[in-house]
Amino acid sequence: MVKVILKRFAELSDQLSDLANTMQVKHSEYSGRYEQVDVEQFLNWCVKARSLIGNACGRESEHYKSFIAAEEPSPFSGNYENLKSLRAVFTAAREDFEGGYLVSVRNLVQAEIADSELDQARELHKSGYISAAAVVAGVVLETTLRTLCDLHGIAHGKLDKMNADLAKTGQYNILMQKRITALAAIRNSAAHGSTGEFTAADVSSMISDVERFAKDSLP
């Protein structure tokens, strides 16, 4: 996902340069001389750039809010003035994303790691290493809980405590808390070699549930 967003920033940066090259000087009897870029191309770029910044930085970020504000047209100037302001916001968002200064970057990296480790868990399960698959899935589960705690200012602790604290603060409901407890129990049994306490089907369901939980928690 991170690579996809970086690629999109590069693509829209190139499109921004092409858009700026369409600038023409025009005249109006009301506002006099003004500078205008291609209207359709400008709108097309704005929609794509706004979506990208929302995904990369978050819709509550200063980057996204500043981009929305810079889109507001002025009755006394052409859209090239908007473009210059939008370019400044777009560049700031790109630099902060590439520099890793955004919380959403960490979330994306965590999500990519989770995907990779869950793929490993599936391969282990497919090859008959059921306990190992459960342990790997359990690592993803605990990492996701730690990340959620970081996002909501909750101290790290043992898995059960983090689970309880997250549920207590309303990050998810009691049913999810109980399911996480059950998933952790499978991980613990697998780690201690108690293979009679779970089945291959249990671990398969565990991997799917952890994946769903991680994706919902780390958008």
Image (tube, grey):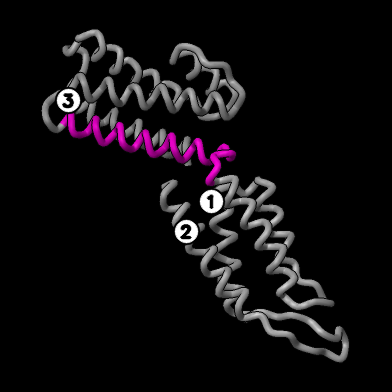
Identified at 54% across, 49% down, the residue is: 56
Decide: marks 2, 3 in contact (CB < 8 A)? no
| Residue type pointed to by label 3 | Ala
Label 1 vs label 3, nearer the camera: 1
Label 1–label 3 contact, CB within 8 A: no
Magenta span contains residue 66: no
Q: Quadrant for residue 38, please give it.
A: bottom right
- Residue 193 has which mark? none
Please tell me which of labels 2 and 3 falls first in the chain: 2
- Left or right placement of residue 146 versus residue 41 in this view: left
For discs 2 and 3, the disc positioned in front in the rendered view? 2
Furthest residue toward right: 30
Q: Could you tell which of marks 1 and 2 lies nearer the N-terminus?
A: 2
* Residue at 52% over, 28% down: 148
Relative placement, left or right, of 131 versus 137 is left
Residue 167, compared with residue 62, is above or below; it is above
Q: Secondary structure at mark 3?
A: helix
- Where 58 sits versus 14, above or below? above
Q: Which residues are magenta?
A: 98-125
**The image quarter in which residue 179 lies:** top left
Q: Is residue 106 located in the magenta-colored stretch of the structure?
A: yes
Q: CA distance from mark 2 to mark 3?
A: 41 Å
* Amino acid at the residue labelled 2: Arg
Closer to the chain start, of discs 1 and 3, is 1
* Circle 1 or circle 2, nearest the eye: 2
For disc 3, the marked residue is 200
Q: Position of residue 2 (x, y in %)?
A: 44, 46
Q: Residue 57: x, y in percent?
A: 58, 47
* Residue wearing tag 2: 8
